[in-house]
Amino acid sequence: MDITFAPIEGKSRAYRIMVVVLGVMVAIMIISYLVAYLSGYQVWGINNAVPWGQLITFDIYFIGLSAGAIVVSGLSYVLGREEYKPIGRIAVFLGLLIFAGAMVCVLVDLGRPEKFWRLFMYGYLNNMTSMFALNSIWYGGYILLMVVYLWLAIENKKRLAMIVGTIDVLWAVGVHSFTGAIFGLIAARDILFSPLKPFEFITAALTSGTALLTVVVAAAFKFSNRNLDKKVILSLGSLLRYIIIVLLVMIFFDKLTHGYFPHREGVLFLFTGPYWWVFWCFQIGMGIVLPLIILFHRRASKTVKGVIIACISVVIGVLGERAALVIPGTAQVQPLYPGNIEGIWGTAGSFPITFWETMLSLGIVALVALLFVLGLKFLDLLPAAEKVKEPVLVEEASEEVAATEAAENE
Amino acid sequence: MEPLYDTRSITDIIFEIAGRLGGTVASSFNGIGGGAEGFVKYRTGDIIPWDELKEKGVWLGPAYQYGNYDGIFNTPSGKFEFYSANLAGVLEKTAGAGNRLDCLPHYQEVEFLGDEGSYPLTLLTYQPLLNVENGHQNYPWAQELYMVMHGFGWGNFIEINKEKAGELGIRDRQMVWVESPFGRIKARARVLEGMHPEVVCMATGQGHYAEGQWQKDIGVNPNDIIGVSYDHLSGQSSFFNTRVKVYRA
Amino acid sequence: MAKWGMVIDLDKCVGCQACTIACKEENSVPHGSPDEQRQRREPYWNRVLAVSEGEYPTVRVEFISMPCMHCEEAPCVTVCPAKATYHREDGIVIQDFRRCIGCRYCIVACPYGVRNFNFKDQLEKEYHRPDLPPNRADRGPWPFPRRVRGVVEKCTFCFHRIDKGLEEGKKIGVDVVPACVEACPTGARLFGDLEDPESEVSYLLASRGSFRLREALHTQPSVFYLHS
């Protein structure tokens, strides 16, 4: 059945307040960046021991979220599943916006951002053995594909959307795998070096993308008084738990290989070093253990609330996973010479959380959120509102539909 | 040669200041010439006549003949002496009666300042390479690599043996008080394997009182807490016999 | 074509750090402040590590002086997206400030940690050298006009000295050496052409046992250390 999509009205007071708050945060973001640009990057936490900080963490996090959202949108456009049709457009739009946020993150992180065009000089001024340069092909193509995909989705061209969507889903997997290759191919750093990194990245992207999409969709539908079939949320939740299990298996084998004798320093630093809490509390605790407990619980996994809590936990946990890669990965003391290296060269790197960098990263999140809520108002992304006043998620109707379908199948 | 303007030689100025200070300072400058020229005459009077010195400008003693020990043995007996009669003579004149066994080669127990019970560790002060010729204190390229063995700059540490630090409950890079019978200073601890357990070590050259851009508030000066003490036989100052105790700040 | 390499004799190195300071002076590398050193924001083109081994009373400390290793299979050259760092024909891994976009991927990839990100602009007055002609007074012998903020820099084996020496026909390794080699008081550092069998460095490498840092990564560094 065809759903008619329509923009939200966007006239309520809560909406306006949200736009204003987000706008203020975006202004703070611009000010933070100007402060950093004019006075130098020492106002951030980066240093020669930990050269990549919050911005690169958010960059790979956003790329992951975007890839995940696009793959979930494939459930609707590529596989043609009916129950995911209401959320298909939002998924693609979210994917596009979050990726734009990721590109902003990378751009502001460069020491000389005015030279970013060098990344696109393929072969001539570029070094194609570098993953950064290779990724500029992937990212450029990805943005184009997403724009075309979104346009086709809004214009309701089903068949073309399916073709472009398929290419985009596969391209998204490629994008994020090669983002993982940026880290996985660095032999110098024990924690980063692993052939599993691209796979870990894309699986973490699927978990976080699915989780974020679930949360955003539930919130968008609830606060704009639309009906969303409860089954959509629950089925995304049950999809999520299997992807989390795959991620757990990958992390387990990666750490087992790196933690096996004799060459264990990297894993020991990650598990017991100064940043142990990023790995254990965020990546494992909030990203894997808590969601699995909720999603496998008999009763909690059947309620929308339980699934939403599990999804929020995954969203925060995967951000912790990216941070557990970037920060301890580079903070670990390099084994330059056997023995105990004295002094500053033998101390693990430290990454302080600084005010301006935090404001900048939160500002970029706010920018993405602002563009999203504005998009809801000006584009046809949500199904048209029904006459029902209170936001009741339709349970009886779905039971009727299930009974009818069961009767038809006999 | 006449001095320029109304300047005077530094030796003359020192003699004048000593005379003006009076007391024991003035008395120690008595009878040694009274001025720059007088002092040179006093020192060289019995070696070379003044006019000959002025003409030649230098006095050379006789060249040493290898094996000619009579020329260099100045002992009263003319032989190699285990019991140093020269030292006995000097001690007789200056210290009066005393333990003449001191004139034999012997082991003299160090007189530590501070008793072993309250102050269990000995403080050793040393000059790292950049302090030997001085000049590092306001030179940031030097200050930033001051402690080479420890890989740190901009400061100095109280260096403690690792096992001893464990007994005292001190961790590496922790602030501690180093207290001697004469005072105490607050310093950062550096816990190492390469220290003797009974000794703590601190580099000099930091903790300046004066205001310099790159030396202000950097490190501590261990000379603030070491005592004034002399070796009784040779009269030289002892720097390394202050006992201290170290505890967490 | 020559292949420049450096040999550091650990037996002779006393850890005086003259090489570190001479390099800073030659290349106009800024000093830091106590805070910056603690936060690891100071640039060091040459660094001297003190490595201690053993327990009391059998403790041993060695000094390892590390310039950039100028690896033949340099990981930093592989990962630089803008080709700002590249391998010159004569073996020096050189850094082009104009191309560098400041992404700091090379700092992550370097196994020796010898690369530094430049956080600050050059303070004009700080390196004022009134003994030099006015156009060099703000940077000494350093070949570039000024230090650029936001790019990555590292040791260059004093390529400006080598290039000028080759132009003037001098013998590299004998008459013309990098600043750190010149400053070493014990003669622990030697520089020369690794492919020339007559050079001092080749002679030493053939006659004494040598090793390189982190050989297991197969980066083929050009800096050799002689056993102490």
Image (cartoon, coloured by chain):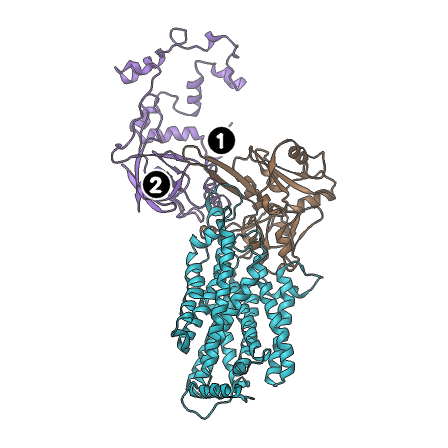
The chain holding disc 1 is B
Provide the residue designation for mark 2.
B165
| Image-based side of C1 in relation to A374, left or right | right
**Is A143 drawn above or below residue B235 in the view shown?**
below
Residue B183 in sight here: yes
Residue A156 position, x and y percent, is 61, 86
**Is A194 drawn above or below residue C67 in the view shown?**
below
Colour assigned to chain B in the rendering is purple
Amino acid at dot 2: Ala
Please tell me if label 2 and label 1 are on a single chain.
yes
Residue B244 position, x and y percent, is 30, 36
Which residue corresponds to the image point at 63% horizontal and 57% vertical from the top-left? C80
Q: Which is more N-terminal, label 1 or label 2?
A: 1
Q: Nearer the viewer, residue B58 or B93?
A: B93
Colour assigned to chain A in the rendering is cyan
Q: Which one of the lettered chains is coloured brown?
A: C
| Image-based side of C83 in relation to A90, left or right | right
Provide the residue designation for mark 1.
B3
Looking at the image, the residue that sits furthest to the front is: A410
Look at the numbered discs 2 and 1 and tell me whether their residues touch, using CB distance below 8 Å: no
Q: Which mark is residue B40?
A: none
Which residue corresponds to the image point at 45% horizontal and 36% vertical from the top-left? C54
Q: Nearer the viewer, residue A163 or C16?
A: A163
Q: Element type at marker 2?
A: helix
Amino acid at dot 1: Pro
Q: Nearer the viewer, residue C102 or B144?
A: C102
Residue C157 position, x and y percent, is 64, 45
